[in-house]
């Protein structure tokens, strides 16, 4: 949805292909967002093993790819703390809608996997977050084929995209290890 996400998506896609990885850039980003949103602290190195278990059959990553994934982890952590910068890592808006929807469904499934590894007490989440996690699960089941690429389908995609962003940031707000934001008084 923005140019910096586009550059990173293309770079990660190329890097993953160069290392014969069978996962997508959307899945890499989704798992990282799920791990962070589930409560994995920035300085908790266990996230790397969780990542490897989920996306690389438990094996470590080649050095170049490990460095890139570490950089992405830190960027996502920063972006989730400053929610105005947080974007999903998906193909550019110019790509076919079906391809973007497929990547979105991959991201959603990977997010749930990462989140579930770290946060196994969803019943302690707010009702709003529990509902959001259910919505994200439903998004993984969305039909991968739009009848046509038109404004209505594009608008539906944007709604799903924004819903996933909201879900990831809600999870981070409740379970993330970022610095707590001061509570703002409610004005009536």
Image (tube, rainbow, N blue to C red):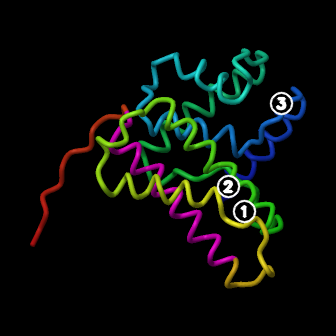
Dividing the picture into quadrants, the one containing residue 52 is top right
Magenta: main secondary structure equals helix
Callout 2 secondary element:
helix
**Circles 1 and 2 in contact, beta carbons < 8 Å:** yes
Q: Is residue 162 magenta?
A: yes
With respect to residue 131, does 120 lie above or below? above
- The residue labelled by disc 2 is 105
Inter-mark Cα distance, 3 to 1? 21 Å
Question: Mark 2: few, some, or many residues within 10 Å (few <14, many ≥20)?
Answer: many
With respect to residue 57, does 171 lie above or below? below
**Circles 3 and 2 in contact, beta carbons < 8 Å:** no
Write down the region rendered in magenta: 154-176
- The residue labelled by disc 3 is 21
Residue found 21% across the figure and 45% down from its top: 182
Residue found 72% across the figure and 67% down from its top: 143
Residue 54 position within the rendered picture, expressed as x and y whole percent measured from the top left:
65, 29
Inter-mark Cα distance, 1 to 2? 6 Å
Is 55 or 83 nearer to us in this picture?
55
Residue found 80% across the figure and 46% down from its top: 10
Q: Is residue 178 magenta?
A: no
Please state if 76 lies on the left or on the right of 150 as rendered: left
Residue 126 position within the rendered picture, expressed as x and y whole percent measured from the top left:
29, 50
- The residue labelled by disc 1 is 101
Circle nearer the N terminus (3, 2): 3
Q: Quadrant of the C terminus?
A: bottom left
Residue found at the far left of this picture: 188
Callout 3 secondary element:
loop
Question: Mark 1: few, some, or many residues within 10 Å (few <14, many ≥20)?
Answer: many
Circle nearer the N terminus (3, 1): 3
Question: Mark 3: few, some, or many residues within 10 Å (few <14, many ≥20)?
Answer: some
């Amino acid at each position: 949805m923005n140019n910096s996400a586009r550059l990173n998506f293309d770079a990660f896609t190329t890097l993953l292909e160069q290392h014969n990885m069978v996962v997508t850039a959307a899945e890499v980003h989704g798992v990282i967002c799920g791990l962070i949103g589930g409560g994995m602290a920035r300085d908790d190195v266990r996230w790397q093993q969780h990542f490897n278990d989920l996306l690389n059959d438990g094996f470590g990553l080649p050095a170049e790819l490990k460095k890139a994934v570490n950089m992405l982890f830190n960027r996502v952590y920063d972006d989730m703390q400053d929610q105005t910068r947080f974007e999903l890592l998906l193909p550019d808006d110019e790509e076919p809608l079906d391809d973007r929807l497929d990547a979105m469904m991959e991201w959603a499934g990977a997010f749930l996997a990462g989140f579930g590894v770290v946060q196994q007490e969803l019943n302690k989440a707010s009702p709003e977050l529990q509902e959001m996690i259910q919505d994200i699960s439903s998004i993984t089941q969305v039909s991968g084929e739009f009848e046509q690429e038109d404004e209505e389908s594009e608008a539906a995609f944007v709604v799903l995209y924004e819903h996933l962003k909201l879900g990831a940031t809600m999870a981070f707000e409740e379970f993330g290890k970022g610095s707590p934001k001061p509570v703002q008084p409610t004005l009536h």
